Image (cartoon, grey):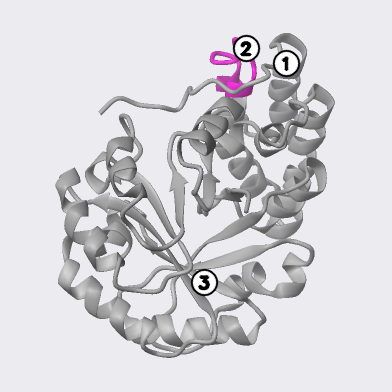
């Protein structure tokens, strides 16, 4: 079976407006992981959460909801509700490094307590849920040796897939990934594995596929924001063309404007995209500052038009968002 190309769940970036436009213009992905939903003790989703989760809103897309919680009871009711909505898979977030998340013991914060995590996993996998469970994880909190124990915990549960981002929580998204840890456990862990982290170009995907032939999936987030044609290229398709990027940017803005009902908020979201998108253009590092400074639609459109007119489009995105430790 071929490796699946999957979109990482990025809060604020890979939501419904992005998914629909990306799938229509760039042939989509094998799976889109929905940015995390946080279930509460009250067993129902909010209207805001349902906008992302309703199957009719995701028609034609293969989407996987992600849950962020450290309470097994909350995970269980939410997973059952998702199964009732027709979903076949739910993903557990054990990777988010945000301070407000880990302070509550969620996301990567759960990795500090392997015994509690094991108890949580035992409860959700013993609940006979009518939905497959996959897990997205980092390799530990502060030291890569922590993954020895975490891997042992994970190996006891029949998860659909374990998606590993080989960074520590303390590293956030800085420095290089610890691919040596992924390589060490690639042949030891019993479940299907996914790889996530610093996959930037089509060559990166090809290298990973060749080096890990039994891999279940490659998951990409930031690089797909920079180069929406990345998966198409990995399937031997053509790189993005300028008219496609122009249309892509305009349609996402329109989609967010419609979703938010507020142009100012839509422009703020587009500035987040351009933090990555400008890396697909040669010499756009200075020009993109005018995108970030734009306060009106006219200023924003003038700033991106300058980039389109004066900065040549690359066939591969530069890794311009990487930061050293």
Q: Residue at x 62, y 33 (%)?
A: 295
Q: Which mark is residue 306?
A: 1
Q: Position of residue 15 (x, y in %)?
A: 62, 56
Q: Position of residue 268 (x, y in %)?
A: 59, 42
Q: Residue at x 49, y 49 (%)?
A: 215
Q: CA distance from mark 3 to mark 2?
A: 39 Å
Give the label, 3 or 1, closer to the camera: 3
Range drawn in magenta: 279-291
- Residues 190 and 224: in front is 190
Please give left or right for residue 117 compared with residue 230 in the image.
Answer: left
Q: Residue at x 40, y 68 (%)?
A: 68
- Residues 322 and 165: in front is 165
Quarter residue 56 falls in: bottom right
Q: Tag 2 or tag 3, which sits nearer the N-term?
A: 3
Q: Which residue is mark 3?
A: 90
- Residues 193 and 120: in front is 193
Please give left or right for residue 130 compared with residue 242 in the image.
Answer: left
Please give left or right for residue 224 compared with residue 186 in the image.
Answer: right
Q: Quadrant of the N terminus?
A: bottom right
Q: Which residue is mark 2?
A: 282
Q: Tag 1 or tag 3, which sits nearer the N-term?
A: 3
From this view, report whether residue 19 is shown above or below residue 26.
Answer: below
Q: CA distance from mark 3 to mark 1?
A: 42 Å
Q: CA distance from mark 2 to mark 1?
A: 12 Å
Q: Residues within 10 Å of mark 2 (few under 14, many from 20)?
A: some
Give the label, 2 or 1, closer to the camera: 2
Q: Residues within 10 Å of mark 3 (few under 14, many from 20)?
A: many
From this view, report whether residue 91 is shown above or below residue 22.
Answer: below
């Amino acid at each position: 079976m071929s490796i699946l190309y999957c979109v990482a769940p990025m809060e604020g970036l890979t939501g419904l407006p992005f998914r629909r436009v990306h799938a229509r213009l760039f042939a989509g992905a094998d799976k889109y992981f929905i940015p995390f939903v946080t279930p509460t003790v009250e067993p129902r989703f909010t209207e805001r959460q349902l906008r992302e989760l309703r199957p009719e809103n995701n028609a034609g897309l293969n989407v996987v909801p992600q849950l962020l919680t450290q309470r097994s009871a909350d995970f269980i009711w939410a997973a059952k509700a998702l199964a009732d909505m027709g979903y076949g898979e739910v993903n557990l977030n054990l990777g988010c490094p945000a301070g407000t998340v880990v302070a509550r013991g969620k996301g990567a914060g759960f990795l500090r307590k392997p015994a509690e995590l094991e108890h949580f996993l035992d409860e959700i996998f013993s609940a006979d849920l009518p939905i497959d469970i996959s897990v997205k994880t980092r390799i530990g909190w502060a030291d890569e040796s922590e993954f020895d124990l975490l891997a042992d915990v994970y190996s006891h549960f029949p998860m659909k897939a374990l998606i590993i981002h080989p960074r520590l929580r303390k590293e956030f998204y800085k420095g290089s990934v610890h691919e040596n840890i992924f390589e060490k456990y690639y042949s030891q862990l019993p479940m299907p594995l996914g790889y996530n982290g610093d996959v930037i170009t089509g060559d990166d995907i090809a290298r990973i596929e060749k080096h890990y032939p039994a891999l279940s999936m490659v998951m990409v987030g930031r690089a797909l924001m920079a180069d929406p044609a990345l998966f198409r290229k990995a399937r031997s398709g053509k790189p993005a063309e300028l008219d496609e990027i122009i249309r892509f940017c305009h349609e996402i803005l329109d989609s967010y404007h419609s979703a938010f009902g507020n142009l100012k908020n839509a422009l703020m979201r587009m500035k987040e995209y351009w933090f990555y998108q400008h890396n697909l253009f040669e010499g756009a590092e200075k020009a993109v500052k005018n995108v970030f400074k734009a306060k009106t639609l006219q200023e924003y459109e003038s700033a991106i038009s300058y980039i389109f007119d004066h900065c040549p489009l690359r066939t591969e995105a530069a890794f311009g968002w990487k930061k050293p430790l």
